[in-house]
Amino acid sequence: ALYGSCGGRLQSAPGSETQAVVEVYRAAPGSTVTAVGVFSDCLYVVKSHLSLVSKLACAELPIFRGPHTESWNFIRVRAKRYGPLKVSKVKGHITIHEVESGQQSSFMRAGNTLADLYAKDGARLEFISEEDADEFDRRDSMVWLIQARALAILPVALAAKPPPEMLV
């Protein structure tokens, strides 16, 4: 199994589950990506992926804005180019009783249990102090301001004619 820290100030279940989908898109050879299935117990990931997939046919696929922006925009580009993965919801914390009664499969129980164990191990890899977390938040806010400014001036910059010295 492959696991690790997701980086960033906080390790969160939705962030980790989103990053897991990114890693599957990265690992799957382009032409075979549509044959790959991902199971997630995180409804946020399943619904967000479904929403993104429903918009793939749009001529101008909108840029994702919100939590885990970089991850979702990576997924957006890969899914548009190679086709989408099949992301399905699996119940979290499946009990032995649910398996024995036929409500859930032992395969899904084992997979979800291992995923949870690896997620906990990965989250422990990157603990940061409150002081470092505050500095991270400060710098992250600055980056968002810079990105917003760059996006605001981009249309104007693209429409402008280049200076004569650049036409050589």
Image (spheres, rainbow, N blue to C red):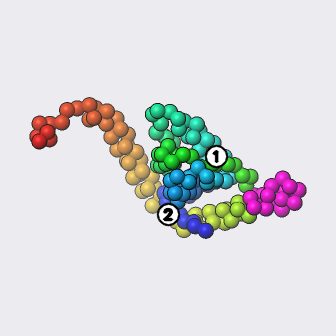
CA distance for labels 2 and 1: 32 Å
- The numbered disc on residue 46 is 1
Mark 2 or mark 1, whichever is nearer to me: 1
| Residue at 50% in and 43% down | 80
- Pinpoint residue 162: horizontal percent, then vertical percent: 18, 36
Residue 14 in sight from this viewpoint: no
Q: Nearer the viewer, residue 128 or 166?
A: 166
Q: Nearer the viewer, residue 130 or 81?
A: 81
| Residue at 38% in and 48% down | 143
- Pinpoint residue 83: horizontal percent, then vertical percent: 54, 46
Which badge, 2 or 1, is on the more N-terminal residue? 1
Which residues fall within the magenta stretch? 93-109
Q: Residues within 10 Å of mark 1 (few under 14, many from 20)?
A: many
Q: Quadrant of residue 152?
A: top left
Is 57 situated left or right of 91 in this image?
A: left
Q: The residue under label 2 is which amino acid type?
A: Ser
Asked whether 152 falls inside the magenta stretch, the response is no
- For the N terminus, give its image quadrant: bottom right
Q: Residue furthest front?
A: 31
- For the C terminus, give its image quadrant: top left
Is 127 situated left or right of 107 in this image?
A: left
Secondary structure category for the residue under label 1: helix
The reply to whether callout 2 and callout 1 are in contact (CB within 8 Å) is: no
Instruction: Quickly name the residue at label 2.
Output: 129
- Pinpoint residue 69: horizontal percent, then vertical percent: 48, 46
Secondary structure category for the residue under label 2: loop
